[in-house]
Amino acid sequence: MTLFRGDMIKRILPMVFSIGVILLSASLQAQEPPAQVLKQSFGAGEGYQDGELASARFFRPQGMCGIGGSVFYIADTFNHCLRKLNVQNNEVKTVLGRCTEKGREEASNVAREAIRLDTPADIACLPKMEYVYLLDSGNNRIIKLNSATAEELVLHFNQGEVGGERLSRPLGLALDPKGDALYVADTGNHRVLRVDLKTAAVERMAGTGFPGFELKGKTAQDLSLNEPTDVFPLHNSSGFALLFVADSRNGVIRKIEPGDRSPWIMSLFAGGDHIGLLQEPPGPAQLIRLDRPYRLGFFDGPTMQILYVGLPTQAQVTAFSLTRHSSVVIEGERLDKAPLRPQALYVDSYGDLWLFDQTSTLRHYWVKPENTATPASN
């Protein structure tokens, strides 16, 4: 009887694994998220201008959130202010900050229009909540505001907290669906935080405070991240279910879940460290190449749950189905064939995708119904 030598096994195993990946990929094709097509585009290019939507100008917004599919708050990052867009009224206006001027004032001591911000990176809101929350990244703070007031959240860190007792260049912010907590991608400190909105107490959910890449550890706090840039929480009937994290420099999407014996555990959802096997979509989530994933959006539909990942470096948006972890490129080019580099990204309750590209143009994508023509771009 002939026995396999070690060198033969080394040659055979990758082949067996590759065949398995191909078969798995084929089995997932039916579960891929549907492609989206461009429905409309808005804006007059880079700059600053309020008023009618067609002539409005933004300067590379990095974050946005929506209420009801027609009202959007926009972190106009390099104009250093917060804008509000009402699609139905065809109007854009500034609601916080002195646009084009960066700086810092204490939010509670001056009028809203006089507050200076520094590269606000993200905004979090919910349809039935009075307040929205702005991540003033360059000033390492979170500002809470409603139609009448604005104030800085005074965060209460644990003394001696790993990574320090202040934020460092945070880029991602999300509200818990119940509205009782904020989740922060504390990018410069390589960690993910949870902020209790009743007490402003800060809990480190994941990250060691130092850049690194580990896949195995007892708790999420034992595992290193490398410049996380965004977070997105999900709930189920029992409450908090999981938190997606764009672990940007590591090129992966993580998920954080409650642990049985520890507060939080963290696992790999998409991307991976097996460089030779990574591929372009479609395919299994953990074999998809993700180059610096930046923004996350989510659609909780009746038949499919979809996680959208904005990839500016790869000039595309990729979607992952939670049911079977398959993936597909949503859009790789603008209509004029120039590369699409998605910045801010938001998915509305209808499953439509809204994003700002590198030209500061707001683009509205939708899942095109069969046998219908694509609407002309505005």
Image (cartoon, rainbow, N blue to C red):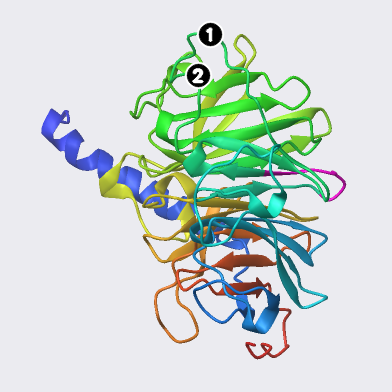
Q: Amino acid at mark 2?
A: Glu
Q: Position of residue 115 (x, y in %)?
A: 63, 48
Q: Considering depth in this image, is 198 or 176 the residue closer to the camera? A: 198
Residue 31, image x, y percentages: 62, 58
Residue depicted at x 72% and y 48%: 111
Left or right: 271 in relation to 157: left
Q: Is residue 96 above or below residue 53?
A: above
Question: Crowding near pointer 1: few (<14 within 10 Å), some, many (20+)?
Answer: few
Q: Callout 2: helix, strand or loop?
A: loop
- Residue 17 pos. (x, y %): 34, 43
* CB within 8 Å, label 2 to label 1: yes
Quadrant that contains the C terminus: bottom right
In this picture, is 159 found above or below 239?
Answer: above
State which tag comes first along the sequence, 2 or 1: 1
Label 2: which residue? 165
Residue at image position (51%, 35%) is: 140
Q: Which quarter of the rendering shows the N terminus? A: top left
Q: Position of residue 210 (x, y in %)?
A: 35, 24
Residue type at numbered disc 1: Gln
281 on left or right of 135: left
Label 2 crowd bin: few (<14), some (14–19), many (20+), radius 10 Å = some
Which residues are drawn in magenta? 127-133
Say if 111 sits above or below 101 in the image. Answer: above
Q: What residue sits right under mark 1 in the picture?
A: 159
